[in-house]
Amino acid sequence: MIESYQLARLAKPHHKEPADIQWTPPNFPWYKINTDATVFAVSKSMGIGVVVRDHEGSVVAALSKCMPLPLGPLEAEAKAIHEAVTFAKYIGLQDVIFEIDSAILSTALNDISMAPTSIDNVIQDTHHSLQAFRRTQIQHVKRIGNKSAHTLAHHTKGIDDFVTWIEETPPCIELSVFQDALSV
């Protein structure tokens, strides 16, 4: 039996993501926001990572936020995209592509009638918040294309609340709007 198990296990193809998948910048005047979440079961908290890039691929803003919410992975991902939408509104973006590595969440945001019950309220609220933008897109991306947001989500293990970064003020962002966002 052990030999049969080992043979079956060896014969099973192992899934590998292609190494050539890369993040690609959006066209001008769009911004692309990658977001991810991680659940810390021991501390009953979650971490959110958000990376905002412009059409040149330059990071213009980023957010790491720790939240004391004992949620499962899907609920944490839903909360992460909601936080990313809120962050994008606060810094004044208008044309935004949101990239997430959850196919379920991507489908739910593009067709809210398909939202699982456990995230329905967050999806409804996020969908409502998306109406504040001029144009938005929700795209599913493989985890390898979402590494920076994933790293920022894990970074929250070492912080109590949230940390934001800004590399340069995008032309569409008024500095006072960004300062208001930092005080939230």
Image: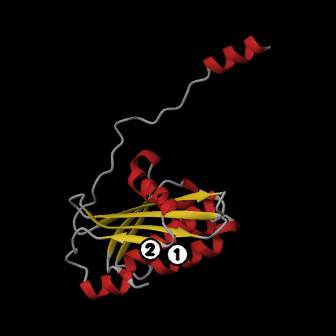
Quadrant location, the N terminus: top right
Q: Which residue is mark 1?
A: 126
Of residues 139 and 47, which is closer to you in this image?
Answer: 47
- Reply above or below: 33 against 133: above
Instruction: Please tell me which of labels 2 and 1 falls first in the chain.
Output: 2
Q: Position of residue 53 (x, y in %)?
A: 29, 63
Label 2 packing within 10 angstroms: few (<14), some (14-19), many (20+)? many
Q: Position of residue 23 (x, y in %)?
A: 33, 50
Residue 4: x percent and y percent?
74, 13
Q: How many marks?
A: 2
115 or 178: nearer the viewer: 178
- Which numbered tag is attached to residue 85? 2
Q: Is residue 87 above or below residue 78?
A: below
| Residue type (three-letter) at the residue carrying disc 2 | Val
| Left or right of 56, for residue 110 | right
Residue at x-position 38% and y-position 54%: 148
Residue 39 at what x, y percent from top left?
Answer: 60, 58
Of residues 61 and 163, the one drawn nearer to the viewer in this rendering: 163
Q: Which quadrant holds the C terminus?
A: bottom left
Q: In the drawing, does residue 98 fall left or right of residue 166?
A: right
Horizontal placement of 40 versus 169: left or right?
right
**Vertical placement of residue 18 versus 81, above or below:** above
Q: Is residue 108 visible?
A: no
Q: Tell me which residue sits at (62%, 69%) in the image.
A: 113
Q: Residue at x 36, y 41 (%)?
A: 21
Q: Secondary structure at mark 1?
A: helix
